[in-house]
Amino acid sequence: MPARKTLIGTAMAALATLASLTGCATRHDGPPSDHFDGRVFRNDEPAPPGALWKFLRWQIFEPGVSWPDHLPIERDRPPPRVHGDDIRVSYVGHATVLVQVAGINILTDPVWSERASPLTFAGPKRVREPGVAFEDLPRIDIVLVSHNHYDHLDKDTLAKLWERDHPLIVSPLGNLAAMRGKALQAVELDWGQSVDKGAIRITAEPMQHWSARGPIDQNLSLWAAFVLKTPSGAVYFAGDTGYGSGAHFKATRQKHGPMRLAILPIGGYEPSWFVGYAHMNPEETVQAGMDLGAQRVLGHHWATFRVTNEAIDEPGQRFASAVDRARIPWEHFRALLPGMAWLID
């Protein structure tokens, strides 16, 4: 009986994790392109085969390191606006960052829900409260949604932001379908397309990842990084991306010039044989920051939801070590904990 319970528990955990990465079908209807065949999107660098069997092997045989159930934080209280040449960033948690620049407030991949999952009882659960209480958020002008996975596209949070502030919501092609039912409006961009909000131009650029809200909609909607051209310099945000050859980072720098700030993921990389194609490890994040010519790098996608196997504090430690080995000043490339803020002056 204990062995059977363990097997059942493992199966339930696998299904919950699969559900947290999938959910309800979305799709894009549009003309084919060099990264869209009329049905599914693809990366410039091909994905390795056998994803389903690798996923099952991971879930059944490599459970990974346990995380604490809950860790306390001290919450940040951001100012209403930041003007002049300064950029202020507040790490809310996982891929959610508040960027305040040129009098504009921007949120990346906002998630205030308790779980990054379509289920209320299973799937990755928050171990740290949001670093900024929702009621302490200043008025939000722009929301960036990089792709449709549940730890990045949270319909309930988007609905609350829309009801309160009616921000400009920007997402790659096909993702509006995942927001429907919440009476949201969003601008969808293909790679290379742009939209303006005040003095800021937002451009979607390639990143190496994938998409799904359900078991039958893999890669039917697009994923993207964003470059924000602001009066205070260029800001780059990638919600999730693999490094691959690094060509997409180098091409972005060649097109847009060096970044004043790059917001890059440092967690979600174990087991590397399965998730490494679509998630950078901390050493690759440091290299990506240098590829982008970034003056400052903020490491995110860690310390909030356990979505992969590494220990909760490992990404921050490995990132700091990689920064030291690259001889980059620690105050230039940083990984904050939820609730911490950074004024780039």
Image (cartoon, helix red, strand yellow):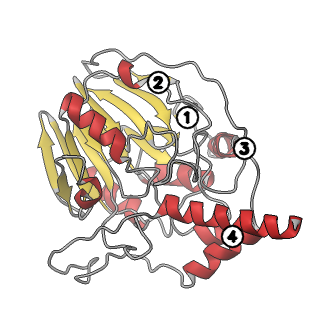
Q: CA distance from mark 2 to mark 4?
A: 36 Å
Q: Residue type at mark 4?
A: Trp
Residue under the image location 25 percent in, 29 percent down: 140
Element type where label 3 sits in the image: loop
Residue 220 screen position, x and y as percent: 31, 73
Q: Earlier in the sequence, mark 2 or mark 1?
A: 1
Front position among marks 1 and 3: 3
Residue extending farthest to the right is 2
Q: CA distance from mark 3 to mark 4?
A: 17 Å
Horizontal side of 306 relative to 145 (left or right) equals right
Residue 58, label in figure: 4
Residue holding disc 1: 334
Q: Which of the 4 image quadrants contains residue 15?
A: bottom right
Front position among marks 3 and 2: 3
Residue holding disc 2: 342
Pick the residue in front: 159 or 238.
Answer: 159
Residue 225 screen position, x and y as percent: 34, 54
- Mark 2 near mark 1, Cβ–Cβ under 8 Å? yes
Q: Residue type at mark 3?
A: Trp
Front position among marks 4 and 1: 4
Q: Residue type at mark 2?
A: Trp
Q: CA distance from mark 4 to mark 1?
A: 30 Å
Q: Is residue 160 above or below residue 294?
A: above
Q: Earlier in the sequence, mark 2 or mark 4?
A: 4
Q: Which of the 4 image quadrants contains residue 230?
A: top left
- Res 231 visible: no
